Amino acid sequence: MKLKSTFNKNTCKILILNALMFLSLSLPAQKPFERKLPSTVKTSLNAYSFNEMLSNHIKGKPNGMTLFELLDFTAKNNFDAIDITGYFFPSYPQVPTDQEINDVKRRSFELGLDISGTGIKNDFANFDPAKRAADVKLAKQWIDVAVKLGAPVIRVFAGEIPKGYENKRDEVATYMAECLKECAAYGKLRGVLVGVQNHGDFLQTGDQAIDMVKRVNSEWFGLIVDTGKFLTPDPYVDVAKTLPYAVNLQIKESPVGPGSSVKTDLPQLMKIIKNSGYRGYLPIETLQYKGTPRPGDVPYEPLKVIPIFFKELKSAIQNEYK
Amino acid sequence: MKKLFLISFIAGILLVNNNATFAQNSIQRKGGTYFRISLQSYTFNKLLNDNVKGRGKGMSLYDLMDFCAENNFDAVDLTDYYFPGYPDKLPTDEFIYDVKRRAYELGLSISGTGVRNDFSNPDPAKRAADVKHVKEWVEVAVKMGAPVVRIFSGAKLPEGSENKWDSVANYMTADIKECVAYAKERGIMIAVQNHGDFLKTADETIKLVKLVNSDWFGIINDTGYFLTDDPYADIAKVMPYTVNFLLKESPIPLGSPVRIDLPRIMKILHDNNYRGFVNLETLSARTPSKDKTKTDGAKSGYDPYTAVPPFLKMVKTAAATEFGK
């Protein structure tokens, strides 16, 4: 279904979105999450916002940040939670020791922070079954880490469509769904939700993401709705469509991509989230622009950028939920 | 906001100074005061028990979570005796995960869980059985995603044997150390609740914390069970060791009409830079009488469905006044 709408026709669009949500709710296959109550949200910070500094620390480079410093920053800024991706544990892709995990968990609790999720880097679009199997194994290992961390959900990726497979979407989707099913089955066994993130890769649109959810068809599986990675004319429509299947979110500064001058319309986004009945975390993720420097670009400084974006988010939440 | 920051900053300095006077163990919290509100399941004790024991429909854990979500609690605290099968059987993984998943779906954190135990019992076999149960429940906590397991110390010493406090504390410490050593390996905190029992005062509670002496051990600060002349002083005193704050309607146990001074409580949380959960617990107006008819919640006219929302509202109002949000 194609929708013609502009960023400005909000009222009309919300009506259409509601209709769409109703439609998707009434589809027979995988049930959306049961959300009968009014929406309520908690804030979280995605560790990837400090990607460079956290990686610097792991590599022993200057200007680094430890996970404990990240937790302190997150607490000082009064986030409700922290989302710690697997690769910010120095041992990644190897799993950390229990002691490392437990120390991070205890410190988070002492600081009043939930751990809203964790995640891995993987590629289930890869045509090589051995590579996919290795990544399924990685996901299972990190599901065990999620249990120990007390993280309720683990993020996985779909992966980029391999060269030469551009016209074989269905074939890729079939083997990808098999991998995700195996992850979800293990997640069910260990009490951890598995969420695939729309990452502008194999999953570029709301429809594609929902199609994958239905293929996997497990109540332990859902979407990490990334507000900055739907490659569609109107990403807000895709966000609205996918929210009934969301197990977590990632709120980005731009609906288009890092470094874009188009900023996320937070009031509109909050309206969409509230209308969906979503109850859970709203992790934010600020990003460094990775292209060739352009005139007027300011260096990416997460310590400054995050509090500003977080303040904007909180005020949008307050306005919408009051 | 600036003012709040300044106050937090000063409170932070006070806290640091405070810490210096204690051994170790006190929790270093950075940032200003920040807490979220949870509901302690004991609030619905009778109804939850009715359900678990098949005495009637009562309330299931799912009903409880729905209630918490409907009232916009941030979290829920689920105690062992409300899980089907207690005390004979541990809940199945399937049941635990289903509860965990439902809580997540509702946007509720699980702020903690807890067990019933008595480490003051002179019979080593009885204590060993309770240690075993704590360990088993640590495993349930891991599976549930609960960060802390609440334990009790043990029963009040019989009258006339108060001089045995230290010797009982010694064997109790050995039991708790065993629990904590296990919990540490599994990434779960153990916290003892002052319950007007073996632990009646802040000093006794802190003494036990220091005997156990572990980063993985702390206090569930029960605002309704310090049996002292000025419970607020005790509540404040144990703050540096508090891992969960249990807020009741009265500072005096067993159905006292005295209402808790919420502005004062907020100030204590603020002064101590508390970060974490504040668990609310409302109780039926029980009397210490042996008369069974008076211990029945239903007969006392206690209705948690109507008791919780106004208490929650008062707590939120007091918080807003203290923290200016």
Image (cartoon, coloured by chain):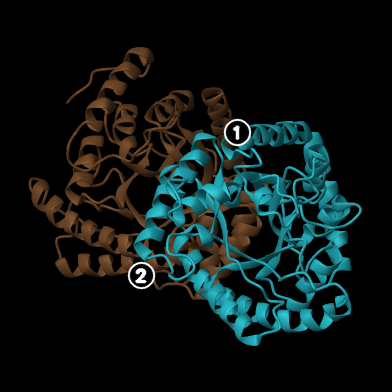
Chain colours: A brown, B cyan
The residue labelled by disc 2 is: A141
Q: Is residue A79 left or right of residue B139?
A: right
Secondary structure type for disc 2: helix
Residue sitting at x 9%, y 47%: A170
Q: Residue at x 83, y 49 (%)?
A: B11
Q: Which mark is residue B306?
A: 1
Graded by Cα atoms within 10 Å as few (under 14), some (14 to 19) or many (20 or more), the crowding at tag 2 reads some
Of circles 1 and 2, the one toward us is: 1
Q: In the image, is A174 to the left or to the right of A286?
A: left
x and y percent of residue B325 in the render?
Answer: 70, 31
Q: Chain of mark 1?
A: B
User: Please, what is the three-letter code of the amino acid marked with disc 2?
Assistant: Gln
In-front residue for pair B226/B270: B226
Q: Amino acid at mark 1?
A: Thr
Q: Nearer the viewer, residue A96 or B260?
A: B260
Is residue A78 visible to the viewer in this orientation of the structure? no
The CA span between labels 1 and 2 is 46 Å
- Quadrant of image for the N terminus of chain A: top left
Please tell me which residue lies in front, B247 or A68: B247
Q: Nearer the viewer, residue B157 or A312?
A: B157
Q: Is residue B70 above or below residue A129?
A: above
